[in-house]
Image (cartoon, coloured by chain):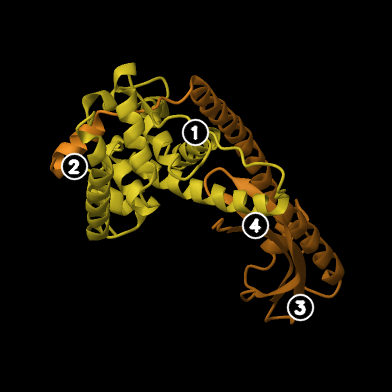
Chain colours: A yellow, B orange
Amino acid sequence: MATFHPQKTYPSTMLQTATEPWTHCYRQLAPRLLLFARQWMSSTTDAEDVVQAAFVKFWKRHPNAPPEHWPLIYAAVRSTALDHLRSADRRTRREAHPDVPVLREDAPFFDQPMEQREDAEIAEMALRELPIEQREVLVLRIWGELTFAEIAATLDESINTVAARHRYALAALRKKLKPHAHERI
Amino acid sequence: MNESDLENQLRLFKPATPPLTLESRITAAFDALEATQKIRPAVDDESLLAKIVRPLFWASVGAAAAVAVISSGSTVPPASGSLLAGAVAGMTEIATPETTRELLAAEESGIRYEAEHGPVREVRASYLEHHAWTDPRTGGRVKIAIPREDVFLQPIAMQ
């Protein structure tokens, strides 16, 4: 299994001290963790629950975690999301009723100024159409800013597998975005 | 557009900011956790003290009873100070004790949450420990039985 690289340099803003050790980490990573959690959860509220549970679980186990260990929080988010899905699946099967529609909340993935909102919506739509295996790699790489080694450790896959998925994801996205390229992206 | 250009384009989109309530919820969760951890050591100290005192108490009672029973027929001198001290003082030349442990019961007493290890299963095992000393000169024999309880914590894998 690949390991994280302690020698990786992190922005100095990530090393500032905060009131609580976790606070600064949260403020740096929260939007990225939430975006990552939303790759599994259909509702933003559920994704927030997952981020909360995973974040608290991580800091409880590693109360003095240095920034080079923070990528592990993505692994915690992923495993919490998968647990949540398993229990939600059991609950749905137990409580399923044909007359009650499944609530699906689709808050946008990205915060964009008005003039770029359409581009963001197109990118989000293309992203949602990718298989989850490619999407999680892409999100960790582009918005999580993790190295391939860190992504491999997070997903418990080899670096080659992760790099290949990233390549496929970009190729698929390029294809999906091409029709819009002359307009916006 | 090559891969790198596309990556750079995608990076321009900023992930949506979570609501402020999420940070408040996490703060509350940490506060609750801290409160739990402040309570737990007190409980642990108490149980540790109980663990030490309980066998000593029963050892004293057992030794006193044993000494009382055999004192008439043995050469063990009368106890001075505490009964246990007297019994031990009189057995300086007595051979190494024979010890056996009799398992009386082992039962699961529930699942509890440890801050460090997560959920653990608590198993309580009750024993009766038998110790016997024989005086090689006289053949006098001292026997004591000590009730003992061990608590085992077995981590539970949640996945």
Query: Do marks 2 and 1 share a chain?
Result: yes
Mark pair 4, 3: CA separation: 45 Å
Q: Is residue B45 left or right of residue A115?
A: right
Query: Would you call the spot at circle 3 few (<14 residues within 10 Å), some (14-19), or many (20 or more)?
Result: some
- Please give the name of the residue rendered at 19% of the width and 38% of the height, measured from the top-left corner: B6
- Please give the name of the residue rendered at 80% of the width and 66% of the height, measured from the top-left corner: B67
Which quarter of the figure has residue B59?
Answer: bottom right
Q: Chain of mark 1?
A: A
Q: Chain of mark 4?
A: B
Q: Amino acid at mark 2?
A: Gln
Q: Are marks 2 and 4 in contact (CB under 8 Å)?
A: no
Which is more foreground, mark 1 or mark 4? 1
Residue corresponding to mark 4: B121
Residue A111 drawn above or below residue B143 = above
Q: The N terminus of chain A lies in which quarter of the figure?
A: bottom left
Q: Amino acid at mark 1?
A: Asp
Mark pair 1, 4: CA separation: 41 Å
Residue corresponding to mark 3: B140
Mark pair 2, 1: CA separation: 38 Å
